[in-house]
Structure formats: C-alpha cells, structure tokens
Amino acid sequence: MLTTFTLCTIPDPVAALAEVRRVLRSDGVLCVLEHGLAPDSRVASWQHRLDGLQQRVAGGCHLTREWPSSCVDAGFELTRLETSCLEGPALARPWSYAFLMAARPRV
C-alpha cells in the first residue's frame, strides 16, 4: 500500500495506520511519503508556531507529526527510513521536511 501526503490530515493517524495494518497481508508493505516534524530546532519551532494555522487553512494538515514512531505504535516494523528537507527556498522548510518509509506488519 502507498500513501503520500495524506496521513497528515487524519485526526488519529495511529488508529488509521493500525487499520491499514489490520487489512494489509502479512507479507504486504506499507510505503509512506509524508511531511512532518523536522529535527532542526529552528525549523521545528516554526512548525509548532504554524501548526494551528496550517490545520485551519489546509484541511486539518499537521506539520508536527513524527511518523516513524506512529508507524511503530500502529504495529509496523520499519524496513526503510529516509528523511530530508525537500528542495526549495528556506522559507518553505516548515512544510518540506519529509519522511520516506517502508514498513511491514510486525508479527
């Protein structure tokens, strides 16, 4: 299953990921591309400041979610994790820190 830039709008992403795990075949793979909380404290500070406004103007989108822990909490084992800031102007960094992950259901 593939999900790209959609989990950020779900009110309870761990519950949604747990449901994906429930219906995913035992040998299935979940692939996720999502923006989230940056490790850079300056960028993260702006993400926290902008998060409420972002939710109101962008359909409930959250800027401050930590996706690796959400996947693990939902019963997945990460098999791939890449993080980076997408290319673009520095002003866009609060919106452009990205997680690329692959995960399998934990047995």
Image: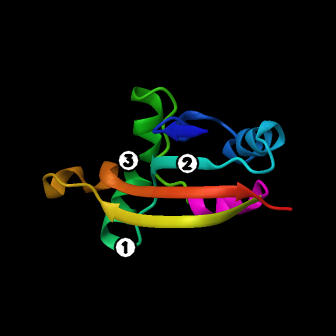
Which callout, 3 or 1, points at the residue further toward the start of the chain?
1
Residue that sits furthest to the front in the current view: 27
Sort mark 3 into few (<14), some (14-19) or many (20+) by Cα contacts within 10 Å: some
Residue at mark 2 to residue at mark 3: CA–CA distance? 27 Å
Residue named by callout 3: 50
Residue named by callout 2: 31
**Left or right position of 4 against 102:** left
**Left or right position of 32 against 107:** left
Which callout, 1 or 2, points at the residue further toward the start of the chain?
2
Q: Position of residue 84 (x, y in %)?
A: 33, 64
Which callout, 2 or 3, points at the residue further toward the start of the chain?
2
For badge 3, the amino acid type reads: Leu
Q: Secondary structure at mark 2?
A: strand
Sort mark 1 into few (<14), some (14-19) or many (20+) by Cα contacts within 10 Å: few
Residue named by callout 1: 41
Marks counted in the figure total 3
The part of the chain drawn in magenta is 67-75
Q: Is residue 105 above or below residue 56?
A: below
* Residue in the picture at 19% in, 55% down: 87
Q: Position of residue 6 (x, y in %)?
A: 51, 35
Q: Are marks 3 and 1 in contact (CB under 8 Å)?
A: no
Name the image quarter holding the N terminus.
Answer: top right
Q: Is residue 3 above or below residue 69?
A: above
Residue that sits furthest to the right in the current view: 107
Q: Position of residue 95 (x, y in %)?
A: 33, 48
For badge 1, the amino acid type reads: Ser
* Residue in the picture at 45% in, 60% down: 37
For badge 2, the amino acid type reads: Cys
* Residue in the picture at 45% in, 56% down: 100
Name the image quarter holding the C terminus.
Answer: bottom right
Residue 39 on the magenta segment? no
